[in-house]
Image (cartoon, helix red, strand yellow):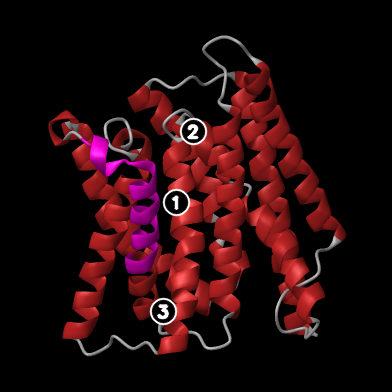
Amino acid sequence: MAIRIAVETMPPFLMAGARFIVAGAVLATILIAMGRFRINRLQLWDNMLIGGLLLLGGNGLVSWAQQKVPSGITTLILSLNPLMVVLADWFVLLVFKDRICGSKPSGLTFLGLGLGFLGLSVLIWPSLIATDETHLDGYRVIALVLACLSWCIGSLYTRYARNPADPFSGAAVQMLLGGMWLILVSLFLGEPFHLDLSAISWNSKMAWIYLMLVGSLVTFTTFIWLMKHVSPSLVEPYSYVNPVVAVFLGWFFLNETVNPRIFTAGSVVILGVVTISFARIRKSKKVTSG
């Protein structure tokens, strides 16, 4: 919802780039002052790529899409990310075949995948073909799916990097360099040259500050730390809560449309995500007991 409010009067890629560069600079400064900023040249290159995947491909496309797509529907589409993680994790296993990176999905996992894609179809298809105010921009919807894919690849790269950086140093570098990727795209699109600072609303400014502090400095850094230390099955449950909260907040604060189809589709998507994570947790318990 904060992204939706910010891009009402701010260019999406410039807004996203600025929030991550500022947050990354703050985190890097704190780490340097504490003597805890540690990263080598190889880790620098890895985190530059991860920053591009997570922040340009992930967050940048979301910011661009939310100029036309309601925040509730955006979050419901993004809740497909855990489903993509399952498929990507399987692909990693097939490619490396070392039983260390990646895992094979179970039958219950495939059931969850089917539910997720069914829910997504129910959610967006009628809106894509509608001609009234409920119509969704097909290109923006595709951008959200691509954002899921980019975030998924970046997340797995973070987890399976052969020479991982300290999580906090890595998060700082990802935000700084990922923010620079966003600024480069913003320059290519000409966003800074058409920016009118006086036209930026107070609500957009407050949303940007929230995104920089809470969304970037706190939440993104926490996510990177968790991906280094905790199984993805335990990181992903945020996807159960986000859609429900986003739909409610979008309806309450932004007067976004909520109808039975959205509730039904959202419930099916979330059920699919829950099914997948349940399957992965059950598999982890079997491995541990074995």
Which residue in the structure is indicated by mark 2?
Answer: 72
Which residue in the protein does label 1 denote? 59
Q: How many marks?
A: 3
* Rendered image: mark on residue 131: none
Residue at 49% x, 78% y is: 46
Q: What predominant SS class does the magenta segment belong to? A: helix
Residue 240 image offset from top left, x and y in percent: 56, 48
Identify residue for label 3. 167
Q: Quadrant of residue 130?
A: top right
Q: Tell me if I can see residue 137 in this picture.
A: yes
**Could you tell me which secondary element the residue under label 1 belongs to?**
helix
Judge the density around disc 3: few (<14), some (14-19), many (≥20) Cα neighbours within 10 Å. many
Q: Is residue 99 magenta?
A: no
Mark pair 1, 2: CA separation:
16 Å
Which numbered mark, 1 or 2, is in the foreground of this view?
1
Tag 2 secondary structure: helix
Comes first in the chain, label 1 or label 2: 1
Left or right of 151? Residue 186 is left
186 is within the stretch colored magenta = yes
Q: Which residues are magenta?
A: 176-195
Label 1 is placed on what type of residue?
A: Asn
